[in-house]
Image: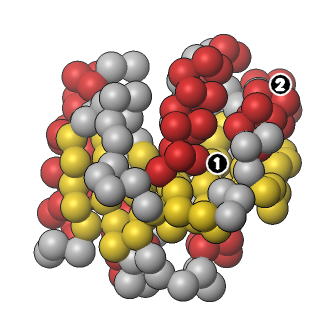
Amino acid sequence: MQAPDWDARYAEKAQWSAGPNELVAALLDDLPPGRAVDLAAGEGRHARWLAGLGWDITAVDFSAVGLDRGRVEAGGDAVRWVVADVLDWTPSPADLDLVFVAYLHLPEADTVDLLSRAIGWLRPGGRLLVLGHDLANLAAGVGGPQDPSILHSVDRLAPVAGLLAVDRLEQVSRATPAGTALDTLLLGRRAA
């Protein structure tokens, strides 16, 4: 999907819940706040949540409509909202404590390139958290994109994981109203 497609989708109705994904909350809730970016932030639910925890957060997405919805929901200047294609965007300065990417699905080469660049934005010890629909979700889960070429898996994220001190790289399940969804989780730290 392109930016105009997502703009239309966001203009039609709110797409996701206001709160963070439960696994994301469990993984990040106890981290000390620092500088972070939420790539492909959509309506900014995670960026707003992180800002509420004291993070200095930038939300980046190519949908101006989605980010506008997030800006209205945030009701203040706690989040920097940046309309940009994440494939072309770079933070300044690149000394982040966290790069967060949830449910961004691109062709494998684009995913590996973006996430590899994102590791370079982290300060030593900074964390990369990636969560997205797993390839196995097509046969054994519910929801998510149905194009196998853009879904995550442990194997597909292995080249990125090889650049990190990995805390977790695994398939995880997520309860949804429609049933169990399967996601891929990568959490790691940039080496000192």
Whether residue 36 sits left or right of residue 113 in the image: it is: left
Direction front: furthest residue? 192
Q: Quadrant of the C terminus?
A: bottom right
Q: Residue at x 57, y 38 (%)?
A: 115
Give the Cα separation between the discs numbered 2 and 1.
Answer: 19 Å
- Residue behind mark 2: 139
| Nearest to the observer: residue 42 or residue 109 | 109
Q: Position of residue 41 (x, y in %)?
A: 38, 49
Whether residue 123 sits left or right of residue 24 in the image: it is: left
Q: Residue at x 57, y 47 (%)?
A: 119
SS of the residue under disc 1: strand
Disc nearest the viewer among 2 and 1 = 1
- 161 up-or-down from 143: above or below: below
Q: Tell me the colour scheme of the image.
A: secondary structure
| Nearest to the observer: residue 56 or residue 67 | 56
Whether residue 41 sits left or right of residue 137 in the image: it is: left
